[in-house]
Amino acid sequence: MKRRKLMRYAGAGLLTTLGMGFGGGLNSSVAQTTGSNVSIQWLGHTCFLFTGGGLRILVNPFRPLGCTAGYRPPQVGADLVLISSQLLDEGAATGLPGNPQILFQPGDYRVSDIQLKGISMPHDRVGGARFGNNVAWQWIYNGVKVLHLGGAAAPIELEQKILMGRPDLLLVPVGGGVKAYNAEEAKKAIANLNPKIIIPTHFRTKAADEATCQDEFSIEPVDNFLDKMAGVENVRVDRVNSDKISFKSADLPQNGAIIKVLSYKF
């Protein structure tokens, strides 16, 4: 069953890479408008639900265990699911409601009127030798250029930077451990990409299972990252008392950047 499902995923990726639309409940006539809102909900760890661009896009559904044990399973409806890796904290897409299309391989895709790009990066600091590759996902949603780095652990190389460009919204792991950026590495990635809005991901919260989220797999709280960013010019922090934010492309800061720290509703 697992092999059959992965073959279905790969087939969907091939069709969209060739520029062919696919069905499964997606509206091929969706039109994006730059004046519309982009709404983002944090579902724990690196998992977010994006709505407002004609497609409901769910990124990195996970299985609650270890550092994610206290989160609720992100069983939410979506039209499209993007997976950064097939590790359980970024690629547990089974059991989702409905019949979403699932993309998990790097490449160029077109889903309805949205162009997506999956960019391969090592998921560890040894060239992917330990945890394989991570897929960073980029797309434009209602005039907002989104880049979700997934579980990036390696520095952004020149070729990757060319593919990524300058994002309006960057979702970046900050908690460290053996398979994602720590605070200093996240700071360097931000300096490299120069985003306008930053949402930190992959950090320790009270969801962590103290018995299994430890040693090399332990991750740090978001405050370590905020302390590291405190001295960066023209970057301010907005602690949002909600798991959701919504904004338009016109709301993007003209100068500097804003770090939006969302709050999980335990």
Image (cartoon, rainbow, N blue to C red):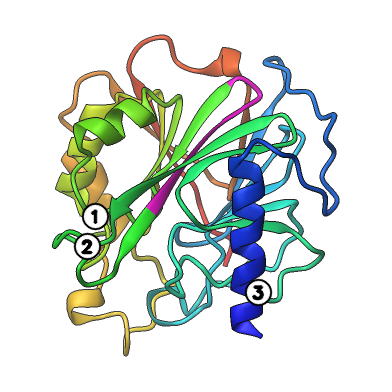
Disc marking residue 153:
1
Q: CA distance from mark 3 to mark 1?
A: 28 Å
Q: Amino acid at mark 3?
A: Lys
Residue sitting at x 38%, y 83%:
209
State the residue position of label 3. Answer: 5
Let me know if residue 87 is in the magenta part. Answer: no
Residue sitting at x 28%, y 60%:
123
Q: Can residue 62 be seen?
A: yes
Give the x, y percent position of residue 29.
85, 29
User: In the image, is residue 48 above or below residue 250?
Assistant: below
Q: Could you say whether the residue bearing mark 1 is in a helix, strand or loop?
A: loop
User: In the image, is residue 30 above or below residue 125?
Assistant: above
The boundaries of the magenta stretch are 135-143
Q: Amino acid at mark 2?
A: Asp
Q: Could you say whether the residue bearing mark 3 is in a helix, strand or loop?
A: helix
Mark 2 is surrounded, within 10 Å at the Cα level, by few (under 14), some (14 to 19) or many (20 or more) other residues, namely many
State the residue position of label 2. Answer: 124
Give the x, y percent position of residue 22.
77, 46
Where residue 254 sits, quadrant-wise, is top left
Earlier sequence position, callout 3 versus callout 1:
3
Q: Could you say whether the residue bearing mark 2 is in a helix, strand or loop?
A: loop
